[in-house]
Amino acid sequence: MDYRLEKRKINLDKMNPIDTFNGGNIYSYRNNLIKIYDKDFDDSHSEKTIRYLSKIKSLQIFMPSKLIFANNKFCGYTLRSIPKNGSYHKIITTPKDYLLDSLFNLEEEIKYISDKKVLFSDLDYKDIKYNGEFFICNPDKYVVLNNNSDSIYDTNILELNSILCKLITKELNSENMTKKNIVNFNNIFKDKDIYVSNCDYLDDLLSNDEDIRSYVKKLK
């Protein structure tokens, strides 16, 4: 198979996949990742869509970097790797102020890509990584709308709210927490108004608590 990374030939046949996704394989390449679709995978992302996304520059919402072709047919793209080192590893034990700053930065970038008409579509908790900063890292879950819509940002923030709740619940389940406290937190966090950012909501929620874990422990 004749693979090209834009105009440069690459020998993908000699590389071994490091992971898979629904519809293809992932490879490591020069400190980046390569996502290659299976040849019979009917993906909704066209070459035009991936090219459009690749022109959007965002630090925390990973976009395709360069396109890959197999025998001159679009078949995948390169993607930045998640930084391995970070200041914190768990959302629930990150100091409140630091966590809110990280979340604020992410929501600012969500506003930026929303203005570019990019909508999240069915994000999973595995599509968001945290190492002291939040990263959304699956462009296959981004949809480009043809029309401008004021509701794109609100919808994206609502999607983020759902995924954050799952991520936090997953971390709380690994702690010595009662099921009742975790369920109570879930209900409180899901009650967020659609027009309120997750950052502002958590700021009010945590109040004087040092982190999410401390807050949940005090719930009745």
Image (spheres, helix red, strand yellow):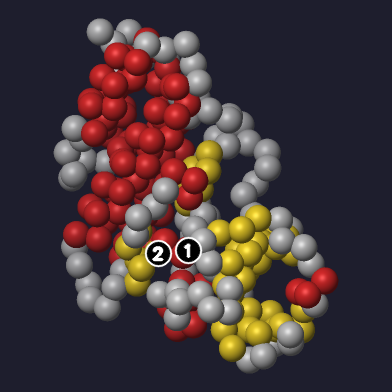
Left or right side of 118 for 80: right
User: For the residue marked with disc 1, what is the amino acid?
Assistant: Pro
User: For the residue marked with disc 2, what is the amino acid?
Assistant: Tyr
Report if residue 57 is visible in the image.
Answer: no
Dots 2, 1 in contact, CB < 8 A: yes
201 lies above or below 218: below
Under tag 2, what secondary structure? Answer: strand
Residue 96 point in image, percent of width and height: 42, 24
Residue 153 point in image, percent of width and height: 26, 56
Q: Residue at x 61, y 58 (%)?
A: 20
Under tag 1, what secondary structure? Answer: helix
Q: Residue at x 68, y 38 (%)?
A: 85
Q: Residue furthest front?
A: 40
Picture disc at residue 142: 2
Snapshot quadrant of residue 119:
bottom left
Picture disc at residue 139: 1
102 lies above or below 218: below
State the CA–CA distance, disc 2 to disc 1. Answer: 5 Å
Decide: few, some or many residues near mark 2? Use Cα within 10 Å; few <14, some 14-19, many ≥20. many
Snapshot quadrant of residue 211:
top left
Q: Residue furthest bottom?
A: 72
Residue 184 point in image, percent of width and height: 26, 19
Q: Residue at x 58, y 79 (%)?
A: 39
Left or right side of 70 for 40: left
Left or right side of 34 for 169: left
Residue 113 point in image, percent of width and height: 37, 62
Q: Quadrant of the C terminus?
A: top left
Q: Residue at x 49, y 16 (%)?
A: 175
